[in-house]
C-alpha cells in the first residue's frame, strides 16, 4: 500500500514569531498567503526540521536554540490518534539518540515518535521522514558558485539514500583533519595516509551516489511536464571523469596519489585538489540546449522545479511514500501557464505540498484542490473560498 507522508497537526510553542500555534491540516496541498513578515516562511522552516539539512539550521545544529526558544514543536502524522511525528526536546547536541515507536495499531507511515533530533543519527531520521524544500534564495542556484549546487544535489541524494549524509560527513571530516595536520606542518606519513585513505573511500562513494541519483532521475521518466522544461543534468569533476574511463580501483589509486602529491600545495592553499568538494552539477535547458545560467529567471525557476518534481516522483516510487514539499514563494517568476502546470503536477503527485506567497489570487488554479490558509501577524486561519 502506498502511504503518504502528511502532517495532520502542527503545534508550535514560542517558535520564532509564533508564541503559540495549533494548526490542523488535511492530507492535500496547503497554500499559505499573507503580507510580508506574517510568518509564512517561519512555518515552513518549522517543517523543514523534518529534513536532514533544515532550511534554517546550518550543517551543525548550532542555530537550533535561537530558532525555537523553548524548543517545542510537534508534528503529527496522519490519523488523529497518532502521536507526534517529531518532538525535539532538550539539548539537541546531547547524544540522547532517538526512539522510534510505531504508534498506530497498523504501524502506518507517519505514526512514529521521535523523542529528540539525533545528533549523530541523521540517517535514521532520513529513513523515517523526507521533505524537499525550495527557498527564494535557491532562485540563484544556477548563478552562484558550485557549493550551493553540490548541497542541493546532496540533499536530493539524502532523500533516497539516508546513508549519504554519513559519507559526506566522513569525507569532510577527513578533509578538515588533513588540512589541520598539513597546516601545523606535522608530516606524520602514517597518519596522513590513513586520513587520505578514508577520504578516498568516502569521496568516491559520494561521487558514485550522486551519479547514481542523476541516472535514476533520468530513468524516473521524462522531466518535462507541460510548460516545465526538461533539464539535462551532468556532473563535472576529475573524479567523475576518471570513473567514466577507469575501473574503481584505479580511480582510488589515482585519487590517493593526487592527495599525496598535493600535500605541499594544499598545506599552503588549504583544501584538496581532488575530491567530491570539487564537483559541480551542470544543468542545461534540454530543448534550448542552453546552460541554465543563461536562461531567463522564470526559465531557471522552472528548471529547478522540474528537477525537484522529478525527484519527488522518484522518491514516491522508491520509498512508497512521497516526501513533504516545502515550496516558499513558489510562484514567483512563473507565468500563468507554468503556474497552472505546476499545480496540476503537485495534485497528480499526491504529496502534501506547502506553498507560500503574498498574493492569493496567483493560487486560484488550486481552488477546490488545496487547503487555503491566511497568515497574518503570526496567526493562521483557514480561508473560505
Ligand atoms: N527567532 C525569531 N523570533 C521571533 N521572531 C522572529 C524570529 N525570526 C524571525 N522572526 C520574525 O518573524 C516574522 C515573520 O517572518 P517570516 O519570514 O515567516 O515572514 P513571511 O510571512 O515569510 O514574510 P515574507 O512575505 O516577507 O517572506 C518576521 O517579522 C521576522 O522578523
Ligand atoms: Mg517569507
Image: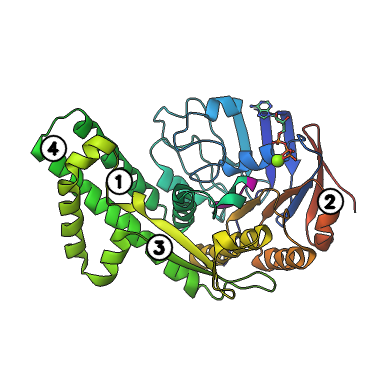
Give the residue number, with chain letter if any, for mark 3. Answer: 235
Residue 144 placed where, x, y %? 52, 49
Residue at 73%, 33% in the rendered image: 21
Q: Is mark 3 within 8 Å of ligand 2?
A: no
In the displayed structure image, the side of residue 291 where residue 8 appears, left or right? right
> How many residues crowd around disc 3 within 10 Å: few (fewer than 14), some, or many (20 or more)?
some
Secondary structure beneath label 2? helix
Residue at the spot x=45%, y=59% of the render?
Answer: 281
Question: In the drawing, what numbered circle is on residue 191?
Answer: 4
Q: Earlier in the sequence, mark 1 or mark 4?
A: 1
- The residue pinned by badge 1 equals 171
- Classify mark 1: residues with Cα within 10 Å, few (<14), some (14-19) or many (20+): many
Residue 374 in the image, given as x and y percentages of width and height = 83, 43
Above or below, 308 relative to 266: below
Q: Residues under labels 1 and 4: Cα distance?
A: 16 Å
C-beta proximity under 8 Å, tags 3 and 2: no
* Residue occupying image coordinates x 70% and y 53%: 330
Q: Observer-nearest residue: 54 or 149?
A: 149
Q: CA distance from mark 3 to mark 2?
A: 38 Å
Residue numbers of the magenta segment: 131-136
Amino acid at each position: 500500500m502506498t502511504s503518504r507522508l502528511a502532517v495532520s497537526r502542527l503545534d508550535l510553542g514560542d517558535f520564532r514569531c509564533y508564541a503559540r500555534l495549533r494548526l490542523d491540516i488535511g492530507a492535500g496541498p496547503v497554500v499559505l498567503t499573507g503580507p510580508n513578515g506574517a510568518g509564512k516562511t517561519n512555518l515552513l522552516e518549522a517543517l523543514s526540521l523534518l529534513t536532514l539539512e533544515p532550511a534554517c539550521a546550518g550543517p551543525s545544529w548550532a542555530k537550533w536554540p535561537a530558532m525555537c526558544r523553548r524548543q517545542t514543536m510537534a508534528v503529527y502524522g496522519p490519523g488523529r490518534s497518532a502521536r507526534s511525528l517529531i518532538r525535539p526536546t532538550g539539548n539537541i547536541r546531547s547524544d540522547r539518540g532517538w526512539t522510534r515507536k510505531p504508534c498506530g495499531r497498523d504501524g502506518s507511515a507517519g505514526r512514529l515518535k521521535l523523542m529528540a533530533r539525533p545528533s549523530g543519527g541523521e540517517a535514521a531520521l532520513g529513513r523515517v521522514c523526507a521533505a524537499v524544500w525550495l527557498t527564494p534564495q535557491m532562485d540563484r542556484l544556477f548563478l552562484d558558485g558550485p557549493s550551493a549546487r553540490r548541497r542541493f544535489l546532496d540533499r536530493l541524494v539524502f532523500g533516497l539514500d539516508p546513508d549519504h549524509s554519513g559519507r559526506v560527513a566522513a569525507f569532510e571530516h577527513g578533509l578538515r583533519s588533513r588540512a589541520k595536520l598539513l597546516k601545523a606542518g606535522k608530516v606524520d606519513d602514517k597518519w596522513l595516509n590513513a586520513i587520505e585513505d578514508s577520504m578516498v573511500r568516502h569521496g568516491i562513494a559520494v561521487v558514485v551516489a550522486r551519479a547514481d541519483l542523476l541516472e535514476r532521475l533520468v530513468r524516473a521518466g521524462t522531466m518535462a511536464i507541460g510548460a516545465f522544461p526538461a533539464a539535462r543534468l551532468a556532473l563535472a569533476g576529475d573524479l567523475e571523469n576518471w570513473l567514466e574511463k577507469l575501473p574503481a580501483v584505479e580511480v582510488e589509486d589515482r585519487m590517493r596519489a593526487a592527495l599525496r602529491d598535493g600535500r605541499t600545495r594544499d598545506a599552503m592553499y588549504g583544501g584538496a585538489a581532488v575530491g567530491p568538494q570539487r564537483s559541480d552539477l551542470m544543468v542545461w535547458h534540454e530543448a534550448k540546449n542552453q546552460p541554465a545560467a543563461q536562461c531567463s529567471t522564470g526559465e531557471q525557476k522552472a528548471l529547478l522545479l522540474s528537477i525537484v518534481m522529478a525527484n519527488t516522483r522518484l522518491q514516491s516510487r522508491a520509498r512508497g511514500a512521497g516526501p513533504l514539499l516545502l515550496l516558499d514563494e513558489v510562484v514567483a517568476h512563473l507565468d500563468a501557464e507554468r503556474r497552472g502546470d505546476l499545480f496540476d503536477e503537485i495534485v497528480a503527485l499526491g504529496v502534501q505540498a506547502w506553498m507560500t506567497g503574498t498574493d492569493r489570487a496567483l493560487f486560484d488554479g488550486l481552488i477546490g484542490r488545496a487547503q487555503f490558509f491566511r497568515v497574518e501577524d503570526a496567526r493562521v486561519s483557514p480561508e473560505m473560498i
